[in-house]
Image (cartoon, grey):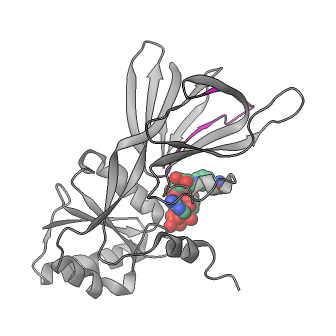
Amino acid sequence: MRIGIYQNDGPISHKVADELALALRQHGIALDNKTPDVVISVGGDGTLLGAFRHYINQIHTIRFVGLHTGHLGFYTDWLSDEIPALVAALVHDNGQSVDYPLLSLTVEYDNGKRQEHLALNEAVVKQPMGTLVADIYLGGELFERFRGDGVSVSTPTGSTAYNKSNGGAVLHPNLSAIQMSEISSLNNRVFRTLGSPLIVPKGEEIIIEPAHSNFALMFDQGMIATNHVKRVRFKVAEQRVHFAEYRHVNFWRRVHNSFINDIE
Ligand code: NAP
Ligand code: MN
């Protein structure tokens, strides 16, 4: 088995990654950042998003592991003082994994070209200045004309990130679905949107067609240039993301630990 280590820039993550690499070598486990079977992300959720992006062309074969070194770490199962236990689990690895849905966004250009991207957390259509005006299609029909700051479309595991700040629901990742949430929509006598988050099953598309150019299109930590973008199609991706599951962390425990735990 080949292990890749992906770390963030902080000094703690560097130290932990060095310790981890040493422990892996001592157990005869090969390190390989080019074509790894398992990628250990050392840092927080941001680091895991970076690891996912870095290995995007290999996600069908890679299993991810999150080793936590501070911050929130919703996706991370191991603490930095658990390196011996993690290495022991890797030594006895027999391919255990759990997989979660991803978001597919297809950017459609004026000339008819299409480009697909995958997101682990969400994609956001936003107007940095002024009001975003966009037609939103559901089930192949015009559903509403949105006016406001923007719209987010998230995966189940991304539902606890930006989506949650927008008042979206937390979605269990056994549900193959995506969730659209509004960011400060305008609602008055003249302008009307649904005003609540909505959840779309696998096989259905959400289409967002901005009425003007110069909007921003973000996904996870990245940004897509929107010159000549006509519309963006969102759906549950065919591909899924795999995590090595050496010990089961119940999804609701994960949510509890991230959002409830330390509040008395
Ligand atoms: P960041 O600014 O550090 O992320 C904001 C926070 O979201 C961090 O505490 C991060 O955890 C946490 N987070 C990331 N993914 C999560 C998930 N799936 N569930 C629960 N919490 C999660 O930037 P970043 O670390 O590069 O993360 C990018 C993400 O930030 C985006 O995908 C978006 O979801 C989120 N974001 C949120 C808002 C908002 O809520 N208004 C605005 C912009 C972006 P760590 O500290 O462990 O990294
Ligand atoms: Mn972060």
Q: Residue at horizontal 40%, vertical 61%?
A: 48
Give the extent of the magenta segment.
Answer: 121-137
Q: Residue at horizontal 23%, vertical 80%?
A: 89
Left or right? Give the position of 134 relative to 208: right
Query: Is 18 placed above or below 106 here?
Result: below
- Front in this rendered view, residue 74 or 173: 173
- Front in this rendered view, residue 221 or 164: 164
- Tell me where residue 7 appears, x and y as whole percent: 35, 66
Name, please, the residue furthest toward the top. Answer: 111
Quarter occupied by residue 144: top right
Name, please, the residue furthest toward the right. Answer: 189
Magenta part, dominant SS: strand
Confirm whether residue 226 shows in the render. no
Left or right? Give the position of 18 relative to 217: left
Query: Is 14 placed above or below 63 here?
Result: below
- Tell me where residue 215 appears, x and y as whole percent: 61, 29
Q: In which quarter of the image is the N terminus?
A: bottom left
Query: Is 9 placed above or below 67 here?
Result: above
Whether the magenta-drawn stretch holds residue 66 is answered as: no
- Tell me where residue 33 appears, x and y as whole percent: 20, 60
Q: Quadrant of the C terminus?
A: bottom right
- Tell me where residue 47 appears, x and y as whole percent: 42, 62
Whether the magenta-drawn stretch holds residue 127 is answered as: yes
Ligand 1 positioned in quadrant: bottom right
Quarter occupied by residue 118: top left
- Front in this rendered view, residue 261 or 197: 197
Q: Residue at horizontal 71%, vertical 38%?
A: 149
- Front in this rendered view, residue 13 or 73: 73
Confirm whether residue 26 shows in the render. yes
